[in-house]
Amino acid sequence: MANDLYSYQRTEYFLSPQDVVNELITWHGTAQYGTDEMSVKLESLHSHLSLDVVKHLKEKVDDEMLRNAQHAFDIAEICCAVADVLALPEAESLSLWAKGNALFFLNQYQEALEYFQHAEKICHNLGHDLKSLRLQINQLAALQEIGEYQTALDLAQHARRTCQTIGEHARRYLALLDMNIGVLYRRLGQMSQALISYEQAHVLFIDLGDTIQAARVDINRANVLEEIDRFDIAEQLLISAQTALTQTGYDQEVGRVDLNLGVLAYRRGQYQTALHHLENAHNTFVAIPNPNEVAVVNVYRALVYQDLNLLQETISLAAAAEITFREDVTLWHEALALMIQGVGYQRLQAYQKAEACLCKARNIFQQSAAHKRVFMLDLERAFLALEQGNYDKAQSLATNIEQNLDKALLPTLTARLHILFASCRLAAHDSQVEKPGGSKLALTIAHHRAKKALALADGYSLTEIAIATYHLLGKILEKMGNLYEARYHYQTALETIEQLRMRLPLDEFQIGFLDNKMQIYQDSIHLSHKMGAITELFYILNMAHTAPLPRPDLFETLPFTLSDTDRQLRNDLETLRQAWHWHQSKLDNPIDPRSDELPKFPEIDVTELRRHVQQIETQIAELTHRWQVRMTNVTTTDEVPISSFRFTSQTAQNFERRIQKRLFECGRETPTKSHVLLHYFVVDGHFQAILVTSDHTHFVPDLISVKAVQRLLKSWQFFIEHGHSKLLSQKSLGMAQTYLNRFYQALIAPLEDYLTDYDFMFLIVPPNEHNLPFAGFFDGQRYLIERFSLTYLSATEVLLTSQKMPVVHDKPHALIIGYSDEGRLPHTTIEGQAVEATLQSNWQTHLLLEQAATHKRFREACQTSHLLHLATHAIFRPDNPFFSWMSLADSRLTVADLREITLPKRPFVILSACQTGRGQPRGGGLLGMGRGFLAAGASGLIVSLWPVADQASAQLMTDFYQCVMPSEQSLNVAAALQHAQQTALQQGYHPFYWAGFIFVQG
């Protein structure tokens, strides 16, 4: 015992400064913050505290701030406490310096500046010139982060003179000064000066043997090179920096490399890769934690979402980041967040909000004397003015920008300027603003500008610019009468779009990416129609309607091994889902919020409730995107060759032949049926049709105006929504047949000469008219379903890519759900029992009725099922189709939920619920519950276009399943549905009860 005590006393007596530092850091890691324990601890070590301890603590801070700034801040707090005990000016200056460094790397720039200024004042009084110089450089870094650019420039000049006076001993500080001046010039938009400063800093750091600081300079150089479109060089610098920083364990700086690799991938149109890098950076900064850097990641994630037209998520992320930047006084990033919101609002056509955001950002740059950034922002304002039809304002802004920026150094901005000028001239031509005789000149000038933009886009691999420019040139050349050249440019734009789209593995990303590009497809369709190029027209129609689901041969899913981050993400999603279900249930079934039923929630009104729901839905969407990105293997997307898609006349001809061959094969597979493909589309406001058989392609133009069809459809929908009580009357049947005959006369009668020999129809309709009741079209004697088995396709290509459904086993599995929505739909449980009874002899059935139909059991059972039948209540949300839902016993199954579900057995799905066939047209697809199941892996589905009484639905499903038996080939679903609908017809049921059910092939 004595020996132990003696040993302890000796150890205590001979504690070195480094020993004291280690003990304090170790103790601080276990102590409770906010107590007096620090004073007690320092008192116990009082005899060992010295200036050397403070120096060692500052060195620890400086080393740790590049790894984990929060940990560095904790050590800085210890340093300040020791300095307070010592009460020495030099100790105080070092501790203030240490705390300023930690705060700087936590992005708390205003506070850091104050600490640097205080420390520098002490060093100056002590005559420590080198330390004063270093602290001036630190102040410069903080000043440029908070937007005090002129003050930063003045201080930089003073610091440079000091370096020159000190000479050789100030070389390291001169390198740091040049690095910070480079950042300052970049923020001001002066890219040449920024690169010069960075290069000078890099040379000095290499000469000094400081590879870490050289790597940090490389990150900054890459930022500038990315902004001026030198992508390859920027990537090389970032990868080199990543290697150096990873080897030394500077995790926070590695996170910044990931951030910048994400930005670079975004600029190249590699959106999936960009999101992976940004996710890595996000996790790094959350772990520190560093909220400001998390906000920076979210700003660039918002930029990616902006290109993918996920605009609510774009605006939400940027708005949240803006608040963080405003609180931290990081003005440059605050302006960037405002710009992103402005462009997002512009795309939503919320022009006043867009202008407000852009003006706020402009004021920030103007107040900071970042004049070149003001001109860059004015380009966004010019495009906003152009979209609003204010061509004079757009052209005036563009002229001012062109006169004041270095166009040779900013290829993207210069190309966009040319596009803006060309678009203004084209708009002037279209609106006949030009003087008589000037129309041709306007087109010539527009063509000249557009060609300049294209040269820059091709020279610097600016894919988004290239798409916009090829489209613009196509429009100009079409107006100039050069139709073949116009066709080439349209097709090249489509080719580029398809190449980028192939790299997106998520269905929502693909649809969003196409959403603002559909006009290019429409213009190309219009021109092919004008030129009579039917084969090419047919091929473009397929692309315009495809918005294809992810192809499993190109995009793999990562093994399902959850990391801590994955688990946290899942927990956050689950918490948000619970909040959404509670809020949604209150909207669906309002109750007194003051009742004892819900003691945990405050009283809120309906308006506030809807606002909460919208916020939660945006958060769920964002976290779901992150989850999907984490579960997708980014390397497989990178391996998709960017040149793998080519649009040629031969490609179009080959596609037509393949479809004709497939129709011939379909006839051989079902010898009693002859197959025809009928594709409706719209040109110049009129329905057109292409019919394809195994040996011919026919084009039938100008069937009826879209407006006439929409008026007729609106009348039909009013009839079926408000005439329920009279549906069984003879008068009601007569009215229905009148409407359905008008549909027939408009859309089928003109095609009869081509349909006489066929009895199986593949059907493609424009997404905006997806709810046309084709099965009920009435020719005066028969309904269309009496003549044809009908199969809907999202695009022609589905015939070539779909597989037989489902993979057949001796006794395949069927999951049947019947939930009455708390008794509101009593026949759903009867339907479920009837379906099970019908299937039992040939299927292994799993029946979940009422309270057994939980979300968890559904997810588990659908993993092994080859058929899913869901009889329940459903709601379509036109305001946000991803939160359309179907009722389960304990929750609502939303389209958003389906994003996380996979159906490995590729089951056939029957959604025997109201409105499950409805959707919102977007990006060439139709967003709704049906698409959610197809995206999850369904091989096909039956959905309803309008609400149907549950008793009638139950009977139709019973008749349907009597004909659905697993065979060695596939389920003949179209024929089984036709049989069920014909049976309902024979039993005297009104078309309302059966014509709304459609079969969609996956």
Image (tube, rainbow, N blue to C red):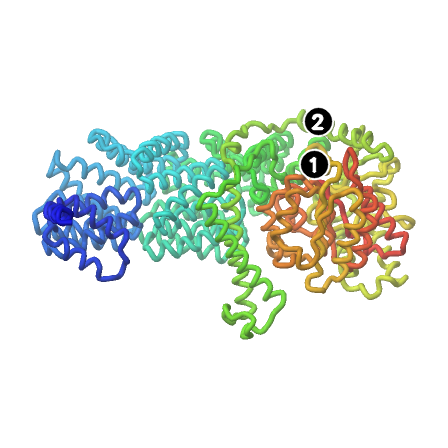
Q: Residue furthest front?
A: 1
Image quarter of the C terminus: top right
576 or 313, nearer to the observer: 576
Please tell me how crowded label 1 is: few (under 14), some (14-19), or many (20+) other residues with Cα within 10 Å: some
Residue 454 at least partly seen = yes
Please state which amino acid type lies under the numbered disc 2. Answer: Gln
Q: How many marks?
A: 2
Circle nearer the N terminus (1, 2):
2
Query: Three-letter amino acid code at disc 1?
Result: Val
Between 785 and 597, the residue placed more toward the observer is 597
Front one among 865 and 770: 865
* Residue at 71% in and 36% down: 807
Q: Is residue 591 above or below residue 371?
A: below
Q: Which residue: 50% across, 68% down?
A: 600
- The residue that mark 2 highlights is 653
- In the image, residue 47 sits, relative to residue 464, either above or below, namely below
Q: State the SS at label 2.
A: helix
Residue 384 in percent (x, y) is at 49, 50
Task: Answer yes or no: is residue 529 visible.
Answer: no
The residue where tag 1 is placed is: 798
Residue 683 quadrant: top right
Q: CA distance from mark 1 to mark 2?
A: 17 Å
Seen from this angle, which residue lies furthest right? 781
